[in-house]
Image (spheres, helix red, strand yellow):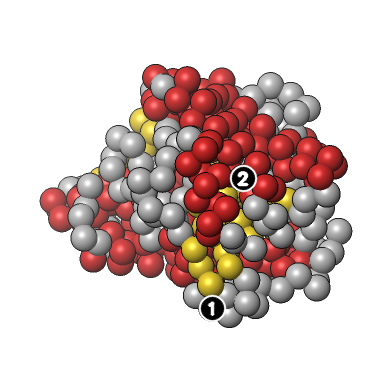
Amino acid sequence: MSDAAFTLTGKRIYVAGHQGMVGAALLRRLGQEDCSVITAERSLDLREQSALREWMSQARPDVVIIAAGKVGGILANDTMPAEFLYDNIMIEANLIEAARQANVRKLLFLGSSCIYPKLADQPIVEEALLTGSLEPTNEWYAIAKIAGIKLCQAYRRQYGCDYISAMPTNLYGPGDNFDLDTGHVLPALIRKAHEAKQAGAPAIEIWGSGTPRREFLHVDDLADGCIHLLKHYSGEGPVNLGSGGDVTIAELARLVCHAVGFGGTITLDTSKPDGTPRKLMSSARIAAMGWEPKIDLADGIARSYGEFLTGPVRQ
């Protein structure tokens, strides 16, 4: 459903999770709007209901964007399932209820592509939610995010709140984690190629067959898509936010090597697992609203390499 009349002009907008990669991108994008941006001190524990409600009643935002949460890779999900489930449910539930009590006019909850069934048809449409089993390695995080989506839907139905949800695909960009053990595939590849170039190594190795396909979206495009949704969408169903295309891991590695200037070869360790063969979300719903990403993958990788080189700390 379209809500083109909603404007951010003059609004007080609270970004929960402003110190993370997504939250920081939202702050950059909101700097282009005629609005006031509100952030909370890190000392405010979003898991604590009373403290958050008191802060929200004093801050009185008009709009809330929920980009806060506990995140991590497969190892973290596997070793800290209770924290991933409890922390994320408490954060989103407290924010959504505090927003209702403070009469927030619009709220955007950010989920994750991992909410969808492991074996969903490709590209994944929003209607695939809850039609199959989740990927076991991150089901704790996924279940918490699904609960957030359902909370927004429930608050729309029971209270008439204009609360919406968006599902980002794999993100990269400023503030990324370049650690080889804990970083996601794209920033980890950037570091691996850079170190191989510095060492004069003849090759870099990637896990698996190189054939799995993955979708990537620059975090600044995500932030722009979020602002578009706030202005133009008011509906119960979640909206996918992706690039609309995917590449194989081998193609991604070649793009990274080109951006880094590493001229060696790429070898495959086929003894390592491939993971899901393909994970691409359908972005048809948001495309029909007139939005599309602006940063192509090759340009985005080049930007990320520049940020890796100039970042304050290279992990």
Q: Quadrant of residue 159?
A: top right
Residue shown at 30%/35% (left/top)? 181
Q: Answer whether residue 189 is visible to the viewer in this image.
A: no
Up-down: is 219 above or below 43? below
Q: Residues within 10 Å of mark 1 (few under 14, many from 20)?
A: few
243 or 195, which lies in front? 243
Residue type, label 2: Ala
Residue shown at 58%/38% (left/top)? 94
Q: Quadrant of residue 65?
A: bottom right
193 or 269, which lies in front? 193
Residue shown at 65%/77% (left/top)? 9
Q: Residues within 10 Å of mark 2 (few under 14, many from 20)?
A: many
Residue 274 position in % (x across, y down): 49, 30
Residue type, label 1: Gln
Q: Quadrant of residue 123?
A: top right
Q: Which residue is mark 1?
A: 32
- Please tell me how many numbered marks the rendered image carries: 2
Residue 99 position in % (x across, y down): 64, 49
146 or 297, which lies in front? 146
* Left or right relative to 9: residue 44: left
Counting residues from the start of the chain, the first of labels 2 and 1 encountered is 1
